[in-house]
Image (cartoon, rainbow, N blue to C red):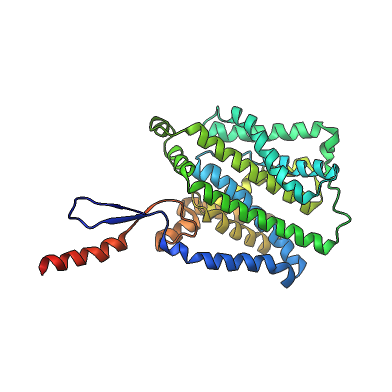
Amino acid sequence: MSTLMAHPGAPKAVVRRSARSSRWTVLALGALVVLLAALPFLVFESVTSSLFMLFVYVVIASMWNLLAGFGGMVSVGQQAFIGVGAYTVVALADQGLSPFLALVFAALTAAILAIPTSWLAFRLRGDYFAVGTWVIAEVYRLVVIKIDALGGPSGRPLTGMSTVDQTLRAAFIYWSALGVAILTVAACYWLLRGRVGLALTAVRDDHVAARASGVDVARAKYVVYLASAAGCGAAGGLLVINALSVQPDAIFSVQWSAYMIFIVVIGGIGYLEGPIVGAVVFFALQQLLADSGSWYLIVLGVLAAASAIWMPRGLWGQVIDRTGFRIFPVGYHVDLTALETRAPARTQERTS
């Protein structure tokens, strides 16, 4: 916390690192996490199986929001790292490693491969970057198809899960997805609260001005790109553990990027809460319109267009505009309450 003064006699404006209202949400978030963790003991397996995809949506949308909403890099090719994570789990499971432990290596492998990928992608800007990342993802898919050890175009089944009890397996899959979702949101919060977060904001607002001001643009972009790749890799690992098989056309499909963009646009781009809100809305629409056929896609398209036109900051942006409430504050704010409480006191002193 710090203070700002216009002149020695003026009341001080208190600048805080986070909003006071957010501190009261810690207990509520903790209770929610405990409740979600206990669901396998409280509800039927069908419920936890459905919630699995909600957590995956939170992970991939948070990663895309970190990349585009905070870093200003609009990618349409994050499915490349989803596929890398999935095939990493399959390959390590063939070597006898538990698929759940392989999730760590799925994230690590995706981050490592993101390094040479970034050398090419970062040469592009704006629309060229978006299209370029899509092309790179297609290259990853074509390379995987050419490798017979990975099953070629037909894909591969996941080994090492057949001996696990089905109920226990479903519970562990659910807990793994919940854990990855929590770690993803927490990692984004930790990353954006530091200097990297400030650098990302500067890069997003004006790339040239940020560099001229001394911001290490390259480092900030590399950090967020690698972090986003790692999260998507973990999500890909979760998907293959849940499906027990992987197929290149499905796991490298551009639909994953479409899901990310839709969720973030609906929830609110540039807010950590946005992907969570958008994922809940998207998940609810999937459950309600699952049997509607093509109407499902029509509704999604209409909602995306309406949100872009009338709610460009998304649902969470509307909440902030109306209430100022933030669950995960990552910036600074001026505490006007301090001014309001100190100014009357000074006025009373002068009148007396």
Front residue of 274/288: it is 274
Q: Locate residue 293: give its quadrant.
A: bottom right
Q: Percent x, y for residue 158?
A: 83, 47
The N terminus - image quarter: bottom left
Q: Point out residue 258 in the picture as x, y percentages from the top left corner.
A: 62, 46
* Residue at the far left in the pictured view: 352
Query: Looking at the image, which residue is at 65% across and 38% down?
Result: 111
Give left or right: position of 313 versus 39. Answer: left
Q: Quadrant of the C terminus?
A: bottom left
| One can see residue 291 in this view | no
In the image, farthest residue toward the right: 163
Q: Residue at x 47, y 46 (%)?
A: 194
Q: For this view, does 177 lie left or right of residue 155?
A: left
Whole-percent x, y for residue 7 in the image: 19, 50
| Rendered image quadrant of residue 138 | top right
* Residue 178 pos. (x, y %): 67, 58
Which residue ends up furthest to the bottom in the rendered image? 42
Counting every numbered tag in the picture gives: 0
Q: Is residue 18 left or right of residue 301?
A: left
Work out whether residue 167 or residue 276 is closer to the camera in this orientation and state it.
167
Residue 337, quarter of the rendered image? bottom left
